[in-house]
Amino acid sequence: MMTVYIESHFVLELAFLQEQYQSCQQILSLCELGKARLVLPTFCLAKPYEAFVRRGNAKNGLRQEIRVELQQLSRAAVLPKNRVDALENVVTNLVQTNEAEAQRLHQTLGRIFKMCEVIPMAPEVLSLAVKFRGKPLELSIQESIVCASVVHHLGTQTAGQKCFMTGISRDFNKPDIHATFDSHNCQLFFNFEKGYNYIQSQLEL
């Protein structure tokens, strides 16, 4: 069976309906049907919530700025009431989109948790992450833990096809990273659509 490694960007694509969310939906559906196995590092479980909090804080800040400006415009009678009401709708929509994103995030993680294997943050993973911080990879702390989690788990797998789908193209799209995953016979994808097409092609063999 194909083993599909993912990280937090996969979750964010689904929760926030980003550009490639449909491909992620298809990958998730294949795993739910038992046609592939989904594996996720423990470290990646917190990052979607961090991203949600950041987005929420940004929206709340923008909402406060708009409300302050609306109060000033109302007092000065600069805009007609229908224009002020239209801007108030923008504030309301910001609140609603935040609530919708929270619901989709919980639903997405709920689906993933039902059939995903989680890679624990073992001492061996952290030791490997320290190694990946140095040359030649020189990854950031977060990326080194993600990479170390997947590579350590790959070292425990002998049979079956494997691929790692990640949105961390800036740090992971390096010759040494590719060589590391190639040594474990693991395909590396920075595009979820291409990753889905790869899985489909292997299932059709």
Image (cartoon, grey):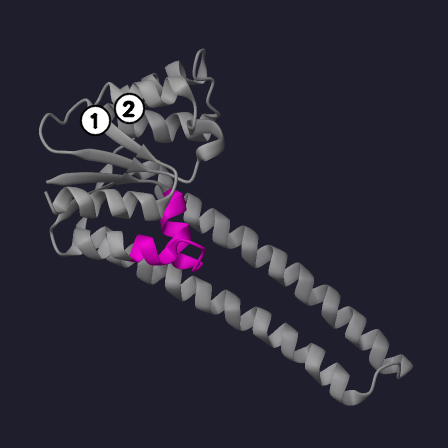
- Residue 7 lies, in percent from the top left, at 35, 40
* Front one among 155 and 36: 36
As drawn, 86 above or below 124: below
Residue at x-position 40% and y-position 25%: 144
In whole angstroms, how far apart are the C-alphas of marks 2 and 1? 9 Å
Residue flagged by tag 2: what amino acid is it?
Answer: Phe
Most prominent secondary structure in the magenta stretch? helix
Q: Could you say which quadrant of the image residue 75 lies in? A: bottom right
> Which quadrant does the C terminus fall into?
top left
**85 lies above or below 52:** below
In terms of sequence position, does the residue under pointer 2 or pointer 1 come before the other?
A: 1
Quadrant assignment, res 123: top left
Residue span colored magenta: 8-25
Label 2 CA crowd tier, 10 Å (few <14, some 14–19, many 20+):
some
| Residue at screen point 24% across, 18% down | 183
Give the image location of residue 26, x and y in percent: 26, 56
Q: Assess whether residue 71 is covered by the magenta stretch.
A: no
Res 123 visible:
no
User: What element does badge 1 sit on?
Assistant: helix
Going 43% across and 17% down the picture, which residue do you hit?
137
> Which mark identifies residue 181?
2
Could you say where residue 119 lies in the image, as x and y percent from the top left?
Answer: 24, 35
Q: Quadrant of the N terminus?
A: top left
Q: As displayed, is residue 64 above or below residue 117?
A: below
Give the camera-side residue of 196 and 151.
Answer: 196
Q: Amino acid at mark 1?
A: Leu
Residues at circles 2 and 1 in contact by the CB criterion of under 8 Å:
yes
Mark sitting on residue 118: none
Q: Is residue 169 visible?
A: yes
Mark carried by residue 154 = 1
